[in-house]
Image: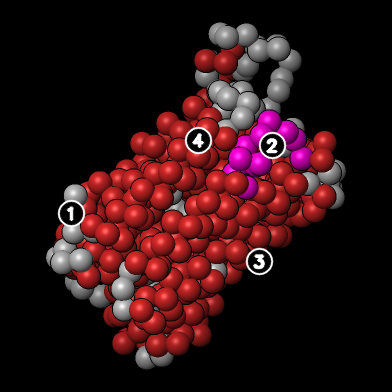
Amino acid sequence: MSTAAETTTTPTIAPAAGPAHPVRRHLGWLLAVAVAVAALNLRPVVTSLGPLLDQVRVDLHMSGTVAGLLTAVPSLCFALFGLAAPALSRRFGPTVVVTAGMAAIALGVLARSFSGGTAVFLLLTAVALAGVAVSNVLIPVVIKRYFPDRVGPMIGLYSMALSVGTAAAAAATVPLTKALGGNWREGLGSWGLLAVAGLLVWLVTLFLRRDRSGKAEAPAAAAKLPILRSRTAWALAVFLGLQATSAYATMGWLPTIYQDAGVSAGSSGGLLALVMVISVPASFILPNLAVRRGDQGLFVVVLALCGIAGYTGLAFAAGTVSWLWACLVGLSMCAFPLALTMIGLRARTPGGVAQLSAFAQSLGYLISIPGPILVGTIYQATGQWYLPLGFLALLLIPQMAVGLRAGQARHIEDEA
């Protein structure tokens, strides 16, 4: 059993007999930096495109239907490519696959900025999203394997960096594009440089690792579980799906909700940024608190109640104390880092985490696809936001129910 002193010293990777070698101690810190840099790159692929989508459509002669398809492609790619992650991890090892994922992100983001047609642009976007998908699934596995005593802090670091990358790409893409001459190609392509930096960090980490071969990592994911038998796995998948539904609907429609309530376009964009920024510190603190409890049900309930209050406020008083509703909705979206934390806690081994992460995230993203579309359909049919926001608030009740089940102190190996 680890002593208190051992759990607060420099992170070490992979159990080893005797004192940690200085190279291994430094490598622990390097791997922590690699996790953070990877997280920064997992959302700009998507959030940098939205502000420039009109320019991209005109320049590539993209139809409205295809542009609409682009909003559904991320969830679909996350689901499909995420399913392949455990098999790739068993064959090559999780750090090798995440490094390849960083390479796919860098290639896709850089190359699509030079594409001359819609088909090539979609294909290269899918390449980048494939890298995001396998990294989504396997970074929690890397954390479980190399930081088993620091799952909470490392998931917190990962989630915080993810939020920073999301907010930065949404807020900085347009100013960055203007500073580079106003062409969308330079604006989108510049995020590929961040991906290249992430790739270099992972390549150095991979080179310095003592267990560089895929064979050394394979046993961690070798035992394939009948995960469909696990109620906890199903509960986590549905919890992630309902959370993603609210998150994507909020990111897609919140500025319109505020503008319909009389808030200016500039202020509505700032309020959307507030929703994402509020989750940055919360995403770091929450996993650290959650990992200290055997049962995470309390956090599930608190976040759901924040969301219900936030969506209710938006429905009836979006133009009044607008910042309060944005903060409450932003806090409710921290259900995602909570879900990542629970994935790390609900399996005993890195191999179990890989299978649980792939199953829960892939099924969860599939569940989330219809939600934002349905919100838009209801709004178009009624011309008001009462029913769409009521729908989002109502979804938090089953999210709370399945979250309470997923938050119980159990392991999928026992159920499966």
Secondary structure found at label 3: helix
What span is in magenta?
Answer: 402-412
Q: Which residue is mark 4?
A: 299
Give the quadrant of residue 253. Answer: bottom left
The stretch drawn in magenta includes residue 380:
no
The earlier-in-sequence mark between 4 and 2 is 4
Picture disc at residue 320: 1
Give the distance between the C-alpha atoms of the residues marked 4 and 2, in whole angstroms: 16 Å
Per the rendering, the mark at residue 346 is 2
Q: Is residue 266 left or right of residue 147?
A: left
User: Where is residue 358 shown, x and y percent of the image?
Assistant: 68, 53
Give the crowd class for mark 2: few <14, some 14-19, many >=20 residues within 10 Å: many
Q: Dot 3 corresponds to which residue?
A: 80
Q: Which residue is painted at 67% across and 49% down in the image? A: 235
Q: Which one is in front in this view, the residue at disc 4 or the one at disc 2?
A: 4
Mark 2 and mark 3 lie on one chain; the one further toward the N terminus is 3
At x 31%, y 61%, the residue is: 315
Quarter occupied by the N terminus: top right
Instruction: Give the residue type at disc 3.
Output: Leu
